[in-house]
Image (cartoon, rainbow, N blue to C red):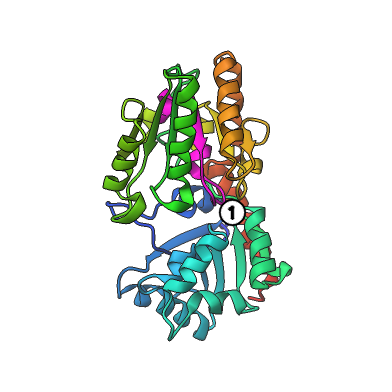
Amino acid sequence: MPKPSLKSIYVVSHHWAAGGKPLDSLWFSQAACLQHGLQLKFVWNGKANSLRKLLPARWVVFDSIGALAFWYGPKLHALAKFSGKKIAVYWHETEWEIEAGIAKCSRRYPSVRYALKDPHVRHFHVCQAGLDTLAKQYAVKPDNLYLLPNISDSSRLLRYSLPLPSEPYLYVACGRVKARKGPDLFLEIAKQTLAYNPKAKFVWIGSFERSGQFSEAAIAASIRDQGLEHAVTFTGEQQDPTPILAKASAFLLTSRDDPLPKVLMEALALGKSCIAFDVGGVADLLGQLGVSIPPGDVSAFVQALRRHQQAPPISADEQNRRRQWYLQRYTPEAFGHRFAKAVDWWNHKVPS
């Protein structure tokens, strides 16, 4: 019996690791997608030859706002649009980052606005809050919206056998040091927690901004001025943050805006307790396996940390519950299944 033909989906990406590989869900899920008859072909929008690579495409996914807005993204969108290709955008952003992307776009060809206004473009989003933003703030028709939760790379996480021991009172956060991620809120939470528990340690993993309030020098000065040097560390970017995450007593997410944080998925895969501001799709991501705090409510966050410190260490059973939640929802295999359903929806929305 002949094998069914593969459908080629071209993925325009702006996230590349040092080895020249995209860093998002579609890249990690190539093998799983192939099992569903979908062959993913990646085009990096940072090179001029990306235009030539996109020419054979019939189906194109712009993977995040950066794929549309940065480098050759606008030209790739124009090529896809005016050559009649089927276009979808996979959004990982809510209004905060969408507006930033719009601002960075060329005025000659504002590709993000064009994609938002085009009734023929289909829109995947990682969380329901993001779909609501597209519908309410940018007037995208609900019929053109599809929920597609993202994932993280599972290969390095599942090497760790559970249960994992944790270092008492070690609290870890991870993400680029910028306003959206709330490193200033992290520092305030640390300061208030240390006032009643001087044994606590706080570690932030992630690269700094080049200048301004969230540069390495500015963060170091803030830590020093508040007398927190003994208890708070910003490590900078780490090639693999997993060994530090694996030691955490709890993972903290202090973001002001974060549609579906991959690092929360990673914390769950490692069986960790999670305390997070309830932004984007955080509540859906955590389910009953973490604590969601009203966005920006530092006092409530500190109280949640206090309750965590007073509770017994997380049990082996609870660690395994978190990993099972992760395995069911946030692996490449789970995403491959979801993406196949999304493409089927897209296929029925757009005549071949």
Magenta residues span: 245-265
Residue 326 visible in image: no
In the displayed structure, 238 sits above or below 142; it is: above
Viewer-closest of 103 and 3: 103
Q: Percent x, y for residue 91? A: 55, 61
* Residue at left offset 60%, top offset 58%: 125
Residue 112 falls inside the magenta stretch: no
Quadrant in which the C terminus is drawn? bottom right
What's under tag 1, amino acid-wise? Val
Q: Number of numbered discs present? A: 1
Residue 263 falls inside the magenta stretch: yes
Residue named by callout 1? 126
Quadrant in which the N terminus is drawn? bottom right
* Residue at left offset 51%, top offset 41%: 254
Residue 132 visible in image: yes
Q: Percent x, y for residue 77? A: 47, 77
Image-based side of 212 in relation to 294, left or right: left
Q: Residues within 10 Å of mark 1 (few under 14, many from 20)?
A: many
In the displayed structure, 190 sits above or below 352; it is: above
Q: Percent x, y for residue 239? A: 30, 40
What secondary structure is found at the residue carrying circle 1?
loop
In the displayed structure, 34 sits above or below 203; it is: below
Q: Image quadrant of residue 54?
A: bottom left
* Residue at left offset 55%, top offset 43%: 333
Q: Percent x, y for residue 40? A: 47, 60
Viewer-closest of 103 and 26: 103
Image-based side of 130 in relation to 108, left or right: right
